[in-house]
């Protein structure tokens, strides 16, 4: 049976997305070393409101879809030649929250990610993936690559670095260094640069 949300008009989904939190899965493919510790993490390069950024995989859980099915769907939609290794009822390694700036809890020390599009509650997973992953032709990934956990690429989607550290290490040791204001300023700078680049591109096109 087709999922009901496959047929939601874009206008209706925009209203829903701007009115209530969306349940999502955040997926970080990992490679383990001989001792079972995470050696590297898989990230995609994708378009975003901040311009091209590196980040994890994932997206919303559809109506009638299990969490495991959502993980498999997002991996398959994003990467070819990849099969997630998960249990029938996978449990998250962490629950992370993403906020648009208008409702972000900046007055607290709560770690969170920034997403101008929606407020999301993300069930976050570090999983091994069988195969040799490459971006699908019609997916959101422009590139896919594994990176050492101590040598992450830049720029990252704001909030992604904290998520990776928390989900991999299972610790909160970034809390003292995780300055929400600094991250907010980074977001503003990225978004401003992206808007200026888009404006310059449009101006060039209009003058042709």
Image (cartoon, rainbow, N blue to C red):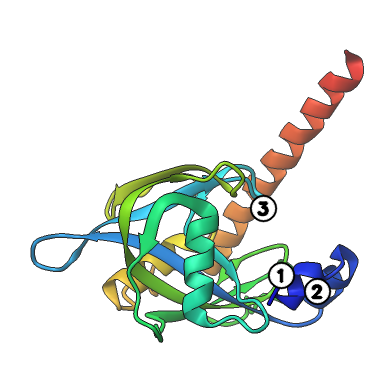
User: Disc 2 vs disc 3: which is toward the camera?
Assistant: 2
Q: Percent position (x, y) of residue 7?
A: 81, 69
Q: Quadrant of the C terminus?
A: top right
Residue 19 visible somewhere in the drawing: yes
User: Does label 1 or label 2 sit earlier along the sequence?
Assistant: 2
Q: Residues within 10 Å of mark 3 (few under 14, many from 20)?
A: few
Q: Which residue is mark 3?
A: 188
- Relative to 61, say whether 83 is above or below: above
Q: Which residue is mark 1?
A: 118
The answer to whether 67 appears left or right of 89 in the picture is: right
Residue at (75% x, 41% y) in the render: 195
Residue at (65% x, 48% y) in the render: 50
Disc 3 secondary structure class: helix
Residue 157 visible somewhere in the drawing: no
Q: Specify the quadrant of the image occupied by residue 15.
A: bottom right
Q: Residues within 10 Å of mark 2 (few under 14, many from 20)?
A: few
Residue at (64% x, 43% y) in the render: 51
Are discs 1 and 2 less than 8 Å apart at CB? yes
Q: Residues within 10 Å of mark 1 (few under 14, many from 20)?
A: many
**Frontmost residue, 113 versus 82:** 82
Distance Cα–Cα, label 3 vs label 1: 17 Å
The answer to whether 51 appears left or right of 36 in the picture is: right
Residue at (70% x, 73% y) in the render: 2
Q: Percent position (x, y) of residue 49?
A: 69, 51
Which mark identifies residue 43? none
**Frontmost residue, 208 versus 131:** 131
The answer to whether 55 appears left or right of 191 in the picture is: left
Q: Which residue is mark 2?
A: 18
Disc 1 secondary structure class: loop
Disc 2 secondary structure class: loop
């Amino acid at each position: 049976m087709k999922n009901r949300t496959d047929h939601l008009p874009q206008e209706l989904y925009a209203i829903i997305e701007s009115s209530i939190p969306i349940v999502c899965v955040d997926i970080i493919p990992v490679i383990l070393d001989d001792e079972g510790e995470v050696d590297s993490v898989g990230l995609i390069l994708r378009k975003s409101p901040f311009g091209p950024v590196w980040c994890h995989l994932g997206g919303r859980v559809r109506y009638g879809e299990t969490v495991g099915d959502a993980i498999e769907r997002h991996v398959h939609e994003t990467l070819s030649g990849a099969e997630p290794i998960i249990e029938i009822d996978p449990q998250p390694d962490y629950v992370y929250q993403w906020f648009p700036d208008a409702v972000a809890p900046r007055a607290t020390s709560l770690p969170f990610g920034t997403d101008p599009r929606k407020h999301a509650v993300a069930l976050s997973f570090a999983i091994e993936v069988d195969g040799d992953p490459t971006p699908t032709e019609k997916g959101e990934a422009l590139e896919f690559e594994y990176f050492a956990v101590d040598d992450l690429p830049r720029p990252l989607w704001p909030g992604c670095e904290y998520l990776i550290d928390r989900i991999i290490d299972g610790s909160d040791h970034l809390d003292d260094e995780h300055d929400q204001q600094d991250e907010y300023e980074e977001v503003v700078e990225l978004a401003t640069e992206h808007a200026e680049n888009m404006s310059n591109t449009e101006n060039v096109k209009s003058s042709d």
